[in-house]
Structure formats: C-alpha cells, structure tokens
Amino acid sequence: MLKDIKFYSIKDEIRILGIDDAPFNFRKDRTITIVGTIFRGGKYLDGVLRTEVTVDGTDSTEKISEMVKKTRHKDLRIIMLDGLGFAGFNLVNIKQLYKETKHPVIVIVRQMPDFNAIKKAISKLEHRDFYEECIREAGKPERVETKPKKFIHIQYRGIKFSDAERIVKLSSTRSLIPEPIRVAHLIASGITLGESRGNA
C-alpha cells in the first residue's frame, strides 16, 4: 500500500509542477501538446516542460511520468493537474502517477463535475474500464477556499488533505487557481493559437 508523504514543513517556495493541455481540434488532431510549468510556490517560474498525449487515449499517465523523470529539475515536490483529463478523455490515474514519480499529485477541479454525465459518456467509449478506474482512484473532490468565500475543489494522492489544501492556497497568488496551473494554461494556448486565450 502506498503511504502518503508527510510534510513536516511546507515552504512558501515549494517546487510545484503545474500541467495543462493545449487547445485542439477533436476532428483533426490525433495528439496534442501538454505543458508543465515549474514554479516556486506561486511566485516564480523556474522552467517549462512539454510532451504530447493521444486524443481520447490512455497514455497521459505514462507521458507525464516520463516528463517528470527526465526533467533536470530534481527538487520538484508536487505535481498539479488542471483536471483529471487531457486531450478529451485521456484520463490520468493519479495513484499510478504518484507510484511512478514518488511525487504527490493534486488535481485542480475548477467546477464540480457532473459524474452522472461523465459515466454516461464513458459507457460508450472503448477504454471504459480504464476510465472508470482513473475516476475511482482520484476520489471525491474536496472544497478549498483559495480566496475569501471563493472556492475550488481538489482531488489528491500521496498527500494529506490538510497539506494539499495549504499548498493550493499558498500557490494561488493571482487568481482562484494555483499559479503553476494558470501559467501552464496560458503557455499551452499561446504556443498553439499564437496568443493565449480564455480564462486562466
């Protein structure tokens, strides 16, 4: 059984990898770019990583794990994901990602998902059992107040909720979501569209 990593102290500049995917065309694109930003807490950008995953595939866990293992930034402590899925329904198994990288994983959930609608959509897909496992391993989203009376939700593996909550709060310096995720979103959309778009 995998044990949670215990944080005896959480520094303001804890190294966080925030990951988001680029915009893509469902009809044309077979693979898409995902971008990772390495931040010191919510303050400074230290580096940018990239890889590609398959649209509606099952390789996002593997590709993210490879990206983390190859980086020269060996002081990473936390992996943050902008949602559980990339490139459509290419879901991440966060238990497996934690097992492979040895870094706790926090999933940022901007809005509570409609689980009934998701289950209905998954039932029609080829990799249904895999997707169901990913959702089950992620657990129920829990609420975090990142600004006064403003909330997001998180899912997590390899870390206690109290530690995950603290890390999310300290890294949410400019918006409701952590800065590593916000900037990864901007970069991912910018390199694909030529200019960053949408709310980050």
Image (cartoon, rainbow, N blue to C red):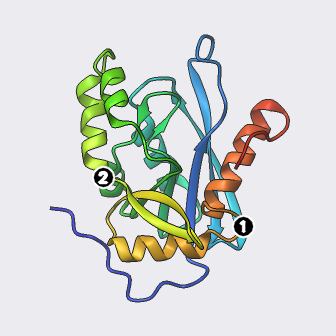
Q: Is residue 184 left or right of residue 3?
A: right
106 vs 110, nearest the viewer: 110
Residue at (70%, 55%) from the top-left corner?
Answer: 183
Tag 2 residue: 140
Q: Secondary structure at mark 1?
A: loop
Residue at (27%, 23%) from the top-left corner?
Answer: 128
What count of labels does the image hold? 2
Residue at (32%, 72%) from the top-left corner?
Answer: 160
Tag 1 residue: 174
Q: Position of residue 191 (x, y in %)?
A: 78, 37
Circles 1 and 2: CB atoms closer than 8 Å? no
Query: Quadrant location of residue 181?
Result: bottom right
Query: Quadrant location of residue 84?
Result: top left
Residue at (59%, 45%) from the top-left corner?
Answer: 20
In the image, is residue 111 above or below residue 164?
A: above
Kindly identify the amino acid type of the residue bearing the numbered disc 1. Arg
Q: Position of residue 199 (x, y in %)?
A: 72, 46
